Each structure stands twice: as structure tokens, then as C-alpha cells.
Image (spheres, helix red, strand yellow):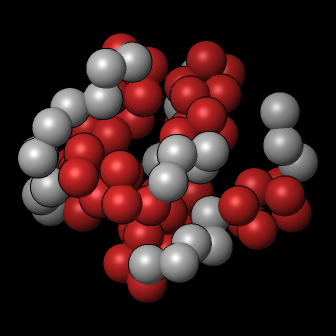
Amino acid sequence: MLNDKQLVWRCRRGIRELDVLFDRFLKSVYPTLTNAEQANFQRLLEVQDPVIMDWLLGRYAAQDPGLETIVEKLKVLSGL
């Protein structure tokens, strides 16, 4: 598991929209997640930005149920 500073750093992305979304998620949703969900979010941070954007925009779904759960939470937060 990443510590708080590492997590904030990992949420900084190459796509501004993801920066904003991940920052909001980290502040408002992440603290309410279970340990397993937090681990899934940290795994999501390993995925390339274009793939995450495709998942968020519904171009295709993550094949991993844990990642898909986090993507759905991100969609709700972003209004997608």
C-alpha cells in the first residue's frame, strides 16, 4: 500500500481531467473505501491514462472486476 504522499503523487497524471478527477476521488471517496477497494484504486493508478479514459468514457469495460468497481465509482463522481 502506498502512503499518503505517494498516493497523491501517483494521482498526478498526464491528462488534466484525470488529475482533477483523481484528486476529488482521493479527497472525498477514497477514505470511505474498504481496504480491498483502496488496493484496487492503487492498482488502477498503474494503468495507462488512455486506457482509463476509454473505461471512463464507456468505450470498453475493465476486464478486472475490482478495477471496474473503481471505474464505476469514478464515473459517478464525475457525472459520466
Nearest the viewer among 28 and 2 is: 2
Q: Going 65% across and 28% down the picture, which residue do you hit?
A: 39
Q: Is residue 36 above or below residue 77?
A: above
Q: Is residue 64 above or below residue 13?
A: above
In the rendered view, does 39 fall on the left or right side of 9? left
In the rendered view, does 20 fall on the left or right side of 12? left
- State the image coordinates of residue 50 (x, y, percent, origin top left): 36, 60
Question: Which quadrant does the C terminus fall into?
Answer: bottom left
Nearest the viewer among 61 and 31 is: 61
Q: Is residue 54 above or below residue 9?
A: above
- State the image coordinates of residue 22 (x, y, percent, origin top left): 49, 63
In the rendered view, does 24 fall on the left or right side of 7? left
Nearest the viewer among 51 and 6 is: 51
Residue 62 lies in what quarter of the image?
top left
Residue 12 lies in what quarter of the image?
bottom right
Q: Can residue 2 be seen from the camera position used here?
A: yes
- State the image coordinates of residue 33 (x, y, percent, origin top left): 54, 31
Question: Which quadrant does the N terminus fall into?
Answer: top right
Q: Can residue 30 be seen from the camera position used here?
A: no
In the rendered view, does 65 fall on the left or right side of 55? right
Q: Going 36% across and 78% down the picture, which residue do you hit?
A: 17
Total labels: the figure holds 0
- State the image coordinates of residue 13 (x, y, percent, origin top left): 56, 72
In the picture as drawn, the residue positioned furthest to the bottom comes out as: 16
Nearest the viewer among 38 and 27 is: 38
Q: Going 42% across and 28% down the picture, which residue do you hit?
A: 67
